[in-house]
Amino acid sequence: MDTIHLKKNIEADLTISQWFRNVYEAVKTTMIGMGITFKYVWGRDVVTIEYPEVREELPANSRSRLYNDAENCIACLQCAVSCPVDCIYIAAIKRPTDAPKMKTKDGTPIRLDLKQYTIDTALCCYCGLCTTVCPTECLTHTTDYEFASYTLASMKYDYLAPDIRAWRTRIVKS
Amino acid sequence: MSAHSNEQEDKIILGDQEVLKSDLLTLNMGPQHPATHGVLRVEIKTDSEIVVDAIPHLGYLHRCFEKHAENLDYRGIIPFVDRMDYLGAMSMELGYALTIEKMLGTEVPKRAEYIRVLVAELQRIASHLVFFGTYGIDLGAFTVFLYCFEDREEILRLFEELSGARMLYNYIWIGGVWNDITDDQLNRIKKFCDRFEGELKKYHSLVGENKIFIGRTANVGVISEQMAYDYGATGPVLRGSGVKWDLRKNRTYGIYDKFDFDVPVGTGEKGVVGDCWDRYHVRVLEMFESLKIVRQALDGIEEGPVMGKVPKIIKVPAGEIYMRTECPRGELGYHLISDGGKTPYRLKVKSSCFTHVSMLPAIAPGLMIADLVASIGSIDIVLGEVDR
């Protein structure tokens, strides 16, 4: 046979005067609360935005969709190494010695030919560690935040593909 | 059946009198229940409306943080640390950064120290505002939720401009902070402090002083001082039970010794010491104290760099450390064992929420189901930190 002992909530005995005091206090404190909320009746500044019609502009250093400007990439692999979830895939081969010399925007010589630069955005955790280590600042976070898609495969961004290179004019700052 | 006849012989004694016993009903609260603040499943055994037993089931948000950390370099762990307590990510990062810096012996620039205090205390306010708002919803007061989230959004917007993300910042780095704070942002924090202090008083009189709210929380879910010690409760839960213990004051870390602030404790103003109302009130008073610290930090902030000298590849010398900090939800401890390599050998996290969840079976018996909701809300757990 089991016996279950339960604590009882501490409750003072309710007298009639206490009952009336409770009712009075409940009405009084509720009225104070109503007073606070009452001035919202006449309206105030709207704090929400009607999203699809009005789009919020994120702060300039907001960390959203990644963009790699492949022309300036020297394939140093620092982003891939620093990535905590390993979602950056890079393949590069050595440039032939007789090929014309190439330089990035800030003057760093390009010694490797980039063959693949893919970021699996579905894995990305948007921590921003890859962009801070980038020596030529070609990998950047953009403020573009609307990139939901229907298939998982389309979340893999190949930054050498022409359709994704075309974002450059649309989403990259400066 | 024999089991059935056994149950009929059971007795339930509530207080000192025997109550009529019916069959116990097993009820699953969660894992998708809005009152459990995340994916917590509480298996409740009830006798009509009275809870006889409550068993929390964890693990729905387990992400193997500790095992992951063994394979990541020290900088790469910070984004994972964020995701533990996603409502107080800055405080999580602060604790982690202090742990590694203590092992490395890194000197953090003064300006970075001040920025860390600023963001950590603003984060405490933002985290307590979520508690304030959702606790109102738990108890049927919806209005205050919207007010709180409006103010919280202002803090989050500031963090977004500072770090680039709204909730998972990766802002406090080993050796300093990522970006410098501008004068414009400091002015905005100052304005926010002035405005928010009055607003908070308003919110408190809207919710905390309300008779119905007091009726729902006073004398409910009492955690006595002894029980808080027994279970190892920390943070607002411990202080709500009347124990004056704050790591920022008692085991100072960073530059918290420079600031002048009080440690609010529960006094049993509306009921007995350690009830839900006390824990609620401690959090409200803590927000005022945090505002005090933010104001002092704004006055004391110095010019200078925000990143100290840290090697490009961090190799923590072999050894062991346990570092604890005061987070919005309580004490957060990092136990780091390093073998001198690029990754930690072991990184164990002591989470306060886990401790507080384990108190549920002790609080619950004898409560009504609605009071159990109030109790779960008042210990303010974040399941990301419980399961890790």
Image (cartoon, coloured by chain):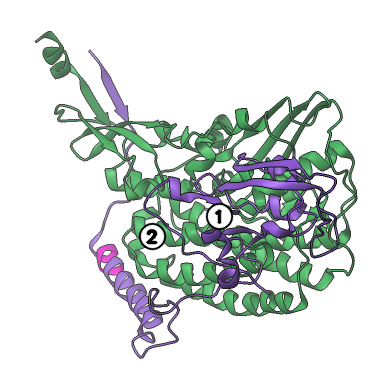
> Do the residues indicated by labels 1 and 2 lie within the same chain of the protein?
no
> In which quadrant is the C terminus of chain B drawn?
top right
Residue B286 can be seen, yes or no:
no
Residue most toward the bottom? Answer: A42
Q: Disc 1 vs disc 2: which is toward the camera?
A: 1
Task: Report the disc number at residue A112.
Answer: none
**What is the distance, in whole Å, between disc 1 and disc 2 at their CAs?**
62 Å
- Estimate the x, y position of residue A36 in percent, counting from the top left: 41, 80
Q: Where are the magenta residues, as a range?
A: A17-21
Q: Chain of mark 1?
A: A
Q: Nearer the viewer, residue A111 or B190?
A: A111
Q: Would you say residue B294 is visible in this rendering?
A: yes
Q: Quadrant of residue A62?
A: bottom right
Please name whichever residue, B127 or A137, is drawn nearer the observer in this view of the structure.
Answer: A137
Amino acid residing under circle 1: Ala
| Percent position of residue A80, x then y | 69, 42
Position of B9 with respect to B180 (left or right) is left
> Which disc, if any, is residue B214?
2
Circle on res. A161: 1
State the residue at coordinates (66%, 54%).
Answer: A128
- How crowded pointer 1 is (Cα within 10 Å; few <14, some 14-19, many 20+) is rated as few
> Is there a contact, CB below 8 Å, between mark 1 and mark 2?
no
Task: Say how many tags the image has.
Answer: 2
Q: Is residue A103 above or below residue A95?
A: below
**Image point 58% across, 67% down: which residue?**
A143
Q: Position of residue B30 (x, y in %)?
A: 32, 40
- The chain coloured purple is A
Residue B285, magenta (yes or no): no
Left or right: B138 in relation to B286: left
Name the amino acid type tagged 2.
Ile
Which chain identifier belongs to the green chain? B
